Image (spheres, grey):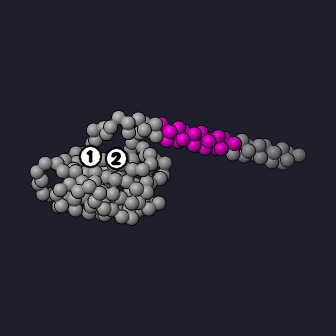
Amino acid sequence: EKAQKDRADKLAKEKAEKAEAQKRAAAEEARLTKMREENLQRMMGQMGGGSPAGTGGTVAKEASYSNSYKGKIQAAIKANLIFNRSISGNPAVEIDIRVGPGGTIISQRIKTPSGNKEWDDAVLRAVERTGTLPRDVDGKVPEHLVVSYTPSDLMRP
Protein backbone atom coordinates (compact mmCIF):
# COMPACT_ATOMS: atom_id res chain seq x y z
CA GLU A 1 0.00 0.00 0.00
CA LYS A 2 2.86 2.39 0.84
CA ALA A 3 4.54 1.55 -2.50
CA GLN A 4 1.34 2.41 -4.36
CA LYS A 5 1.07 5.70 -2.49
CA ASP A 6 4.73 6.53 -3.27
CA ARG A 7 4.16 5.66 -6.92
CA ALA A 8 1.01 7.83 -7.03
CA ASP A 9 2.88 10.71 -5.37
CA LYS A 10 5.74 10.33 -7.84
CA LEU A 11 3.34 10.33 -10.81
CA ALA A 12 1.55 13.39 -9.45
CA LYS A 13 4.87 15.18 -8.97
CA GLU A 14 6.03 14.30 -12.51
CA LYS A 15 2.68 15.46 -13.90
CA ALA A 16 2.98 18.76 -12.03
CA GLU A 17 6.58 19.27 -13.24
CA LYS A 18 5.54 18.51 -16.81
CA ALA A 19 2.63 20.97 -16.58
CA GLU A 20 4.97 23.63 -15.15
CA ALA A 21 7.48 23.06 -17.96
CA GLN A 22 4.71 23.39 -20.55
CA LYS A 23 3.50 26.56 -18.85
CA ARG A 24 7.03 28.04 -18.94
CA ALA A 25 7.44 27.07 -22.61
CA ALA A 26 4.11 28.68 -23.49
CA ALA A 27 5.06 31.85 -21.60
CA GLU A 28 8.42 32.02 -23.39
CA GLU A 29 6.74 31.51 -26.77
CA ALA A 30 4.25 34.27 -25.94
CA ARG A 31 7.10 36.58 -24.91
CA LEU A 32 8.99 35.91 -28.17
CA THR A 33 5.83 36.41 -30.24
CA LYS A 34 5.14 39.71 -28.48
CA MET A 35 8.75 40.83 -29.04
CA ARG A 36 8.53 39.94 -32.75
CA GLU A 37 5.26 41.86 -33.09
CA GLU A 38 6.72 44.92 -31.32
CA ASN A 39 9.79 44.82 -33.57
CA LEU A 40 7.58 44.57 -36.64
CA GLN A 41 5.43 47.51 -35.51
CA ARG A 42 8.51 49.61 -34.75
CA MET A 43 10.05 48.82 -38.13
CA MET A 44 6.82 49.61 -39.96
CA GLY A 45 6.82 52.98 -38.19
CA GLN A 46 10.43 53.61 -39.17
CA MET A 47 9.72 52.78 -42.80
CA GLY A 48 7.20 55.59 -42.98
CA GLY A 49 9.52 58.06 -41.27
CA GLY A 50 12.51 57.73 -43.57
CA SER A 51 15.87 56.29 -42.68
CA PRO A 52 17.34 57.03 -39.27
CA ALA A 53 20.96 58.11 -39.00
CA GLY A 54 23.02 54.93 -39.02
CA THR A 55 26.06 53.93 -37.07
CA GLY A 56 28.16 51.82 -39.36
CA GLY A 57 26.87 50.33 -42.58
CA THR A 58 23.20 49.90 -43.11
CA VAL A 59 21.30 46.68 -43.59
CA ALA A 60 17.97 46.32 -45.39
CA LYS A 61 16.09 43.11 -45.90
CA GLU A 62 12.72 41.71 -46.91
CA ALA A 63 11.49 40.46 -43.51
CA SER A 64 11.66 41.84 -39.98
CA TYR A 65 14.68 41.47 -37.72
CA SER A 66 15.71 42.63 -34.28
CA ASN A 67 17.66 45.82 -33.62
CA SER A 68 20.62 43.82 -32.39
CA TYR A 69 20.68 41.76 -35.59
CA LYS A 70 21.62 44.77 -37.69
CA GLY A 71 24.65 45.31 -35.46
CA LYS A 72 25.61 41.62 -35.62
CA ILE A 73 25.59 41.67 -39.44
CA GLN A 74 27.55 44.92 -39.58
CA ALA A 75 30.15 43.66 -37.10
CA ALA A 76 30.54 40.31 -38.87
CA ILE A 77 31.22 41.95 -42.23
CA LYS A 78 33.26 44.85 -40.83
CA ALA A 79 35.60 42.35 -39.11
CA ASN A 80 36.57 41.09 -42.57
CA LEU A 81 36.76 44.49 -44.27
CA ILE A 82 40.32 45.40 -45.22
CA PHE A 83 40.88 48.72 -46.97
CA ASN A 84 44.00 50.82 -46.46
CA ARG A 85 43.68 53.35 -49.25
CA SER A 86 42.54 56.91 -48.93
CA ILE A 87 39.42 57.95 -50.81
CA SER A 88 38.09 61.40 -51.44
CA GLY A 89 34.59 61.76 -50.14
CA ASN A 90 32.62 59.01 -48.47
CA PRO A 91 31.19 56.86 -51.28
CA ALA A 92 28.60 54.25 -50.34
CA VAL A 93 28.39 50.83 -51.95
CA GLU A 94 25.36 48.55 -51.65
CA ILE A 95 25.90 44.80 -51.74
CA ASP A 96 23.01 42.41 -52.45
CA ILE A 97 23.45 39.19 -50.43
CA ARG A 98 21.58 35.87 -50.76
CA VAL A 99 21.76 33.62 -47.70
CA GLY A 100 21.06 29.91 -47.15
CA PRO A 101 18.92 28.60 -44.26
CA GLY A 102 21.92 28.07 -41.97
CA GLY A 103 23.29 31.57 -42.56
CA THR A 104 25.77 30.55 -45.27
CA ILE A 105 26.25 33.32 -47.80
CA ILE A 106 25.25 31.86 -51.16
CA SER A 107 25.98 34.87 -53.34
CA GLN A 108 26.88 38.52 -53.17
CA ARG A 109 26.90 41.17 -55.86
CA ILE A 110 27.23 44.92 -56.08
CA LYS A 111 23.74 46.39 -56.24
CA THR A 112 24.75 50.05 -56.31
CA PRO A 113 28.43 50.87 -56.94
CA SER A 114 30.11 53.68 -55.04
CA GLY A 115 32.05 54.95 -58.01
CA ASN A 116 35.31 53.69 -56.49
CA LYS A 117 36.03 50.17 -57.76
CA GLU A 118 38.68 49.46 -55.09
CA TRP A 119 36.24 50.29 -52.28
CA ASP A 120 33.44 48.27 -53.89
CA ASP A 121 35.75 45.25 -54.31
CA ALA A 122 36.98 45.54 -50.70
CA VAL A 123 33.42 45.41 -49.34
CA LEU A 124 32.52 42.55 -51.71
CA ARG A 125 35.58 40.59 -50.51
CA ALA A 126 34.63 41.28 -46.87
CA VAL A 127 31.18 39.78 -47.44
CA GLU A 128 32.77 36.80 -49.18
CA ARG A 129 35.28 36.29 -46.32
CA THR A 130 32.46 36.46 -43.77
CA GLY A 131 31.08 33.22 -45.21
CA THR A 132 28.27 32.72 -42.69
CA LEU A 133 26.01 35.34 -41.15
CA PRO A 134 24.95 35.11 -37.50
CA ARG A 135 21.39 34.13 -36.59
CA ASP A 136 18.90 36.63 -35.22
CA VAL A 137 17.49 36.32 -31.69
CA ASP A 138 14.67 34.13 -33.01
CA GLY A 139 17.25 31.77 -34.56
CA LYS A 140 16.43 32.75 -38.13
CA VAL A 141 18.57 34.20 -40.89
CA PRO A 142 17.11 36.32 -43.71
CA GLU A 143 17.19 34.81 -47.22
CA HIS A 144 18.05 38.15 -48.78
CA LEU A 145 19.50 41.39 -47.52
CA VAL A 146 21.31 44.47 -48.76
CA VAL A 147 24.24 45.98 -46.87
CA SER A 148 25.58 49.46 -47.43
CA TYR A 149 29.04 50.61 -46.34
CA THR A 150 31.07 53.79 -46.58
CA PRO A 151 34.77 54.28 -45.77
CA SER A 152 33.81 56.26 -42.66
CA ASP A 153 32.13 53.09 -41.33
CA LEU A 154 35.64 51.68 -40.81
CA MET A 155 36.41 54.50 -38.39
CA ARG A 156 33.43 53.75 -36.14
CA PRO A 157 33.90 51.30 -33.26
Q: Determine which of the numbered discs, if any, sits on residue 71 in the image.
A: 2
Does residue 127 show up magenta in the picture? no
Numbered range of the magenta stretch: 19-38
Is residue 98 at all visible to an observer of this figure?
A: yes
> Where the C terminus falls, by quadrant?
top left
Up the image or down, 43 lies above or below 84; here it is: above
Tell me if 122 is positioned left or right of 38 in this view: left
At 73% from the left and 44% from the top, the residue drawn is 15
Q: Residues within 10 Å of mark 2 (few under 14, many from 20)?
A: some
Q: Is residue 6 toward the left or the right of residue 26 in the image?
A: right
Residue 14 spot, x, y in % from top left: 72, 46
Q: Is the magenta stretch mostly helix, strand or loop?
A: helix
Q: Quadrant of residue 156?
A: top left
At 33% across and 57% down in the image, what residue appears? 96
Going by the numbered disc 1, the residue's amino acid type is: Gly
For mark 1, give the secondary structure: loop
Residue located at (49% from left, 48% from top): 138
Horizontal and vertical percent position of residue 118: 17, 61
> Do tag 2 and tag 1 residues touch (Cβ < 8 Å)?
yes
Residue 94 in picture, x, y percent from top left? 28, 54
Residue furthest to the right in view is 1
Q: Is residue 12 left or right of residue 112?
A: right
Q: Say which residue label 1 marks.
A: 56
- Neighbor class of circle 1 (other Cα within 10 Å; few <14, some 14-19, many 20+) is many
Front residue of this view, candidates 30 and 94: 94
Residue 87 horizontal/vertical position (percent):
12, 53
Q: What residue type is labelled 2?
A: Gly
